[in-house]
Image (cartoon, helix red, strand yellow):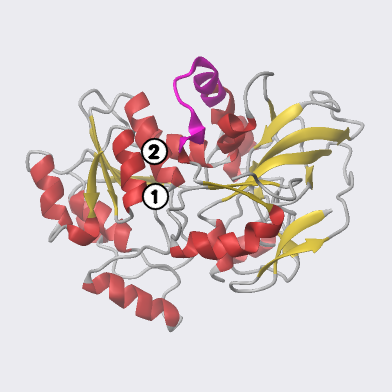
Amino acid sequence: MKAVCWFGKHDMRVENVPDPEILNPRDCIVRVTRTAICGSDLHLYNGFIPTMEQGDIVGHEFMGEVVEVGREVKKLKKGDRVVVPFTIACGSCFFCKKQLWSACDNTNPNAQIMEGFYGQSGSGLFGYSHMMGGYAGGQAQFVRVPFADVGPIKVPEGIDDEKVLFLSDVFPTGYMAAENCDIQPGSTVAVWGCGPVGLFAIRSAFMLGAEQVIAIDRFPERLHLAQESGAEVLNYSEVPDLIDVLKELTGGRGPDACIDAVGMEAHGVSIDAISDEIKQRLMLETDRPMVLRQCIQACRKGGVVSIPGVYGGFIDKVPFGAAFGKGLTMKMGQTHMHKYLQPLLDHVQKGDIDPSFIISHRITLNQVPDMYDTWLKKQDHVTKIVIDPWADRIAA
């Protein structure tokens, strides 16, 4: 089969690799019909995620058709159309039973590596390094899916792939980010980053009852989608003092909740942002937490800072004293995907949201390496890239 493989920093290649096989009786094999490049895949592309090995198959947003099932799989059969969540969960451990699915104890075979980095291990992830399980990813024609009775959700007939593909990650991730904000009637939520997760956080905040959402980014195409989603928009590169403007828009208090949908590779024009870039290049800091600092500074007293943006290691100069002094609640982490799949599928079926609104590019596997660079540089008005693994070319 063909698959997108990581060979080093800024080096993605389409390779012919062996087809996956059933390794465990609870596995299934999925023929991928649609997959996507996620913003967090750029952390792999930029070389910031350790324990990647040359030839690793990447990608964690995918869906397709079940073509083979292990002998212990009861809920799926050949021919079922499914979306697969990017986190892998066993369904029976302490954390899965508490619906803390991304903290699963049983799906990372390399848990000792994560324990060395973080003290404890979370669940395994598709296509996202060996410390997170070493599982082959979904930017491929076929994928082996472990715990097939637990993760994949069946897609009803009559719903287009592009309307459900993002249930695999970015829609539930944006929704959990908004849910973590403890939104009340009249709430104001500020969202940093209008990429796919940020855009879904905006839509989700309104679905959960927010009165006002303020979206912060610098790319016109992203700000346009945020505005179409109902948000007030701020181009941070054109605002003299973002914190002051947010206070002005919220009666002097600050937003009730702030969402950092950017994470470890934040861009900015301030002194601290420039300092972060220099320290990261010199290996003095692993992540650039400029947005996290702004969220803490902007959030009202007693408010919530929600962090769906990926952080990988150690960060510097975070105003933790301000977070303590203001009594902020901070909520973060990998998405507990399995909790959200059916409720969000119901929203799609009812027509409450069409998640395909974020798509800007539809491509083939052979175009993926070049599109990683386009995504990184935010060229060609890119907002989301969807891949058909079986197409030779995509019609214009």
Q: Would residue 45 be visible to someone looking at this image? A: yes
The quadrant holding residue 74 is: top right
Assess whether mark 2 and mark 1 are in contact (beta carbons under 8 angstroms).
Answer: yes
Q: What residue lies at 87% left-to-right and 51% top-to-bottom?
A: 19
Image coords of residue 72 (percent x, y): 88, 30
* SS for callout 2: helix
- Asked whether 15 falls inside the magenta stretch, the response is no
Task: Specify whether 341 is left or right of 284.
Answer: right
Residue 312, image x, y percentages:
50, 63
Q: How crowded is mark 1: few (under 14 residues within 10 Å), some or many (20 or more)?
A: many
Using residue 384 as the reference point, say whether residue 53 is left or right of it.
Answer: right
Total number of numbered discs in the rendering: 2
Kind of residue indicated by mark 1: Ala
Q: Residue furthest right?
A: 71
Q: Tell me the residue at 64%/72% (across/down).
A: 11
Does residue 299 sit above or below 81 in this rendering? Answer: below
Extreme residue toward the top, this view = 350
Picture coordinates of residue 50, whole percent (x, y): 60, 69
Label number found at residue 201: 2
SS class of the residue under badge 1? loop
Mark 2 residue type: Ala
Secondary structure, magenta segment, majority class: helix
Q: In what quadrant of the picture does the C terminus appear? A: top right
At label 2, counting other C-alpha atoms closer than 10 Å, the crowd grade (few under 14, some 14-19, many 20 or more) is many
- In this rendered view, identify the residue nearer to me: 349 or 280: 349
Residue closer to the observer: 222 or 305: 222
Would residue 355 be counted in the magenta stretch?
yes
Who's the residue at 52% across and 25% down the image? 344
Q: Is residue 381 left or right of residue 38?
A: left
Circle 1 residue: 261
Going from N to C along the chain, the mark reached first, 1 or 2, is 2
Magenta span? 344-357
